[in-house]
Amino acid sequence: MTATGDKKTFLQDKARWVWKNTLLIHGTAPETRIASSLSLVEVLTVLYYGNILKFKPAEPLWEGRDRVIFSKGHGAIAMYAILADLGFFPATALESVCTPGSFLGGIPDPIVPGFETVNGSLGHGPGVACGIALALKRKKNASRVFVIVGDGEINEGSVWEAIMFAGHHKLDNLVMILDNNTKCMLGKTNDVLDMRPVAPKFESFGWQAEEVDGHDILAVKKSLEGLCAGTVMKPRILIANTIKGHGVPALENDPICHVKSLSRDDVKKLTGE
Amino acid sequence: MPQTLTRMRDMFIEEIALRMQGDERIFFVSADLGSSALDTLRAKHPSRFVNVGIAEQNLVNVSAGLALEGFKVIAYAIAPFITMRCYEQVRVNLSMLSQFRDINVNLVGVGAGLSYDLSGPSHQALEDLSIMMTLPNIQVFSPSDAITSRAIAAHTVTQTGPKYVRLDGKLLPVIPDDHAISMKPGFRELKKGRDICLISTGYMTHHALEASRLLSHSGIDTGVIDLYAINGFDRESLKSTIRSYKHLVTLEEAFTGKGGMDTCIQSFLKQNRIDTDLVSLGFPHEYRFTVGPRDTRLAETGIDANGIAAHVRSIMQH
């Protein structure tokens, strides 16, 4: 088998593992937003297992790390599985999600090792990420800032204040990942506020934009590697076209799956556990 | 001899500019608000000055990001806009985040109280003290002149944590005083009195001193305390300073009884089981849209020097 094939199998296996464990967490914590968490499984797998991010699980605030700002915090449940697997905290903690006294809530905050900012209120991540990116440049630190936003989240005006700022200041160490899962709470994102075409909007503010099938793991890897390796003096955005509730037909086919929970039986059937 | 007038915002910025020379970690962020002192600062330190544009939400978020990376940040804008336009950014990315990470972001708002008198209520700040103090982890400061402003500027970059500093926009005299300005105790007793004491903040301290002078002519000896560390003052020091008084009057350019300095003093008295009589003076709970120069508005409300003196006489007669 070729090296690419090995990598693909490894990443696909990992993505399958992350998907399954995200569902298992939801099985014990039905308050978690499962549909929003499943759309990002492949992207997060590539970031954390595909040699894109620099990090040290034993030293979450290591100065040389790449900063990840999870702005769409409600869709971060897959991160719990990944961070535990990588050793940011013990995997046994996953059983405690949403239970009294646990540090793992429905939406992660910096009480969870691996998270930089307070999450849950949408539209804050991009501006904070801009401040970090500017600071890293001033400190001559070569780390990157990745900020993960949702397609509904970019309705927030504060997101565009940050987009303008990043473009103006040519923050080429900033990578935004847009989880374009096409649905927000009350229906399709484009029926609520049609923001299409998205990529040209970013380009007109001085960003380099790229679109990718967010579930094609090798394509995601190639796009992220390309965006990081590029030398253009612009912030980057990867528009990951994804499916909300990916891999779960009951969620995929429901336009208002945002707050939908799966039963333990559903989870059992889907995961085989 | 005419009094020298200074702008506390220029003194604040001059102090920061001075500190920036010796401290590479200080960053100044403005939401397109300037001052003559700021022109000098940004010419001298272009790599550590950034104008985010008219975008207060981004001002706070960018400042939080810079602070997460170890910069000591001065975020500068008009008082109502840096507190109210971006309140949730302050709540999430300063108040909450500072419980996990060491972030030194200083929100510096120009336009305390009615200092933008002719611009109308949109530019005036009568709610800022209250809404900033209801957020955990935020220290709130309100200087009365350029000297206190300068001392607070020094404090912002030497003590970490999120802070809000409410600066006056007008030219004001420096209050003659020999006390060293210190965040502990966080207030200064400008005048000792008998039986009654005015606890004042910001611009109102100038009227409090004048009221005290007027009252001395009629034999009423009125104390004046200038409180500048509104929620961080040293409890024990204030306790011993006010011990001898039977009556206290709070004075602030804010809505009365709505969580401002008066509420702070009230709860301080209650917590310490001090049953001194307390009267709160400030503005009624409504906006005023007719044009009114600041001192005219204070006189109409009965809280200029003459109005304060009248309140004190009435308290002393009962």
Image: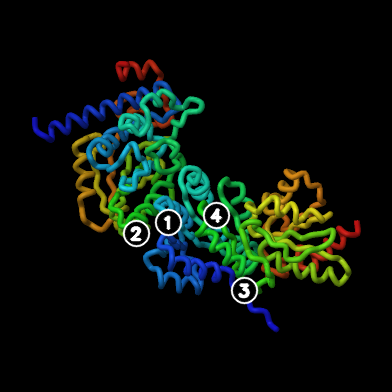
Q: Is residue B132 above or below residue A182?
A: below
Label 4 vs 1, first from the N-terminus: 1
Residue A255, percent from left and from top: 38, 31
- Identify the residue position indicated by label 1 in the image: B71
Query: Chain for mark 4?
Result: B
* Residue, far left: A1
Q: Is residue B194 above or below residue A18?
A: below
- As helix, strand or loop, the secondary structure at mark 3 comes to strand
Q: Which one is in front in this view, the residue at disc 2 or the one at disc 3?
A: 2
Q: Where is residue B188, by image quadrant? A: bottom right
Q: Which residue is more in the foreground, B178 or B135?
A: B178
Q: Which one is in front in this view, the residue at disc 3 or the one at disc 1?
A: 1
Q: Residues within 10 Å of mark 3 (few under 14, many from 20)?
A: some
User: Which label was assigned to residue A138?
Assistant: 2
Q: CA distance from mark 3 to mark 1?
A: 31 Å
Asked if labels 2 and 4 touch by Cβ distance under 8 angstroms, the answer is no
Quarter occupied by the C terminus of chain B: bottom right
User: Which label was assigned to residue B163?
Assistant: 4
- Identify the residue position indicated by label 3 in the image: B171
Identify the amino acid type marked 2: Arg
